[in-house]
Image: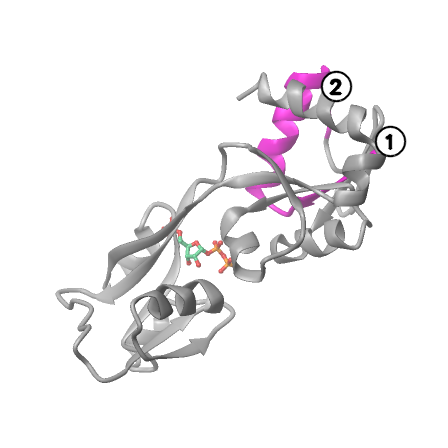
Amino acid sequence: MLTIALPKGRIAKETLEKFEAAFGEKFIFEDRKLILEKAGFRFLNVRNQDVPTYVMHGAADLGVVGLDVLEEKEYDLIKLLDLELGRCKVAFGLKRGEELDFNKSKITIATKHEKIAKRYFEEKAMAVDIIKLYGSIELAPLVDLADCIVDIVETGETMKQNGLEVGPTIMESSAHLIVNKNSFYAKKDLILDLKEKIEAQL
Ligand code: PRP
């Protein structure tokens, strides 16, 4: 039996579709249930940012999570496969018509991705103030909480509708299948078989 942590929402749905195609079974979570057991799999329905935590602690053997979440926390896990879904990028958002002023003595950035933003500016040896937010990041420049934001961009629609423009990209992201290190050795055959079958669906 393999336990797989899936992030709530569209990525879970698209991942389960790949499992359906790979194993010829229907995998559907009932109404509010958080566990789905079928055909040798146990799927867990968890919050996006919690996926690596379940896998790190071995509560799940595998998980599906965006590269941006992995980069943000630097977990000790195996990245097994790029599922090529949930594609997005982590990019700057600036007020329309504005540019990143690298000559400014200090730039203030609002973001959920503190580490990714910090690393970007450390590489440029620039001083920045990072304000951690948990959501509605696009609001920050509009009310002068920050000069700009670093956030997930999928279609760019959220920034557009809030008078922001998509600036430089920091990283590309997509959903990856991750594995707990101990599970990988203890259940290697099962996991490699799964990898092969899912890979054939990509
Ligand atoms: C992300 C991000 C943006 C939006 C971008 O939020 O924070 O608000 O998606 O998508 P778009 O470019 O297609 O408009 P998400 O929906 O993941 O919610 P979250 O803030 O709860 O993570």
Residue 112 shows in the view: no
Image height of 97 relative to 107, above or below: above
Q: Residues within 10 Å of mark 2 (few under 14, many from 20)?
A: few
Quarter of the rendering containing residue 125:
bottom left
Residue at image point 19% right, 81% down: 104
Between discs 2 and 1, the one toward the N terminus: 1
Q: Quadrant of the N terminus?
A: top right
Q: Is residue 53 above or below residue 1?
A: below
In the image, is residue 95 above or below residue 90?
Answer: below
The label shown at residue 1 is 1
Tell me which corner region of the image, top left, top right, bottom left or bottom right, holds residue 194: top right
Spatial separation of the CA atoms under disc 2 and disc 1: 15 Å
Q: Residues within 10 Å of mark 1 (few under 14, many from 20)?
A: few
Q: Are marks 2 and 1 in contact (CB under 8 Å)?
A: no
Residue 25 tag number: 2
Q: Residue furthest left?
A: 97
Kindly report which numbered mark, 2 or 1, lies closer to the viewer in this rendering.
Answer: 1
Amino acid marked by disc 1:
Met
What residue is drawn where x is 30% and y is 80%? 143
- For residue 181, which numbered disc appears in the image? none
Residue 161, given in percent of the width and then of the height, sits at 28, 58
Q: Which residues are magenta?
A: 1-27
- Between 26 and 105, the one nearer to me in the picture: 105
User: Residue 158, relative to residue 202: is it above or below?
Assistant: below
Horizontal and vertical percent position of residue 136: 43, 67
Secondary structure of the residue carrying tag 1 is loop
Which residue appears farthest toward the bottom when viewing the image? 105
The reply, left or right, for residue 77 in relation to residue 86 is right
For the point 64% across and 47% down, the residue is 8
Q: Ligand 1, what quadrant?
A: bottom left
Residue 179 showing in the rendered view: yes
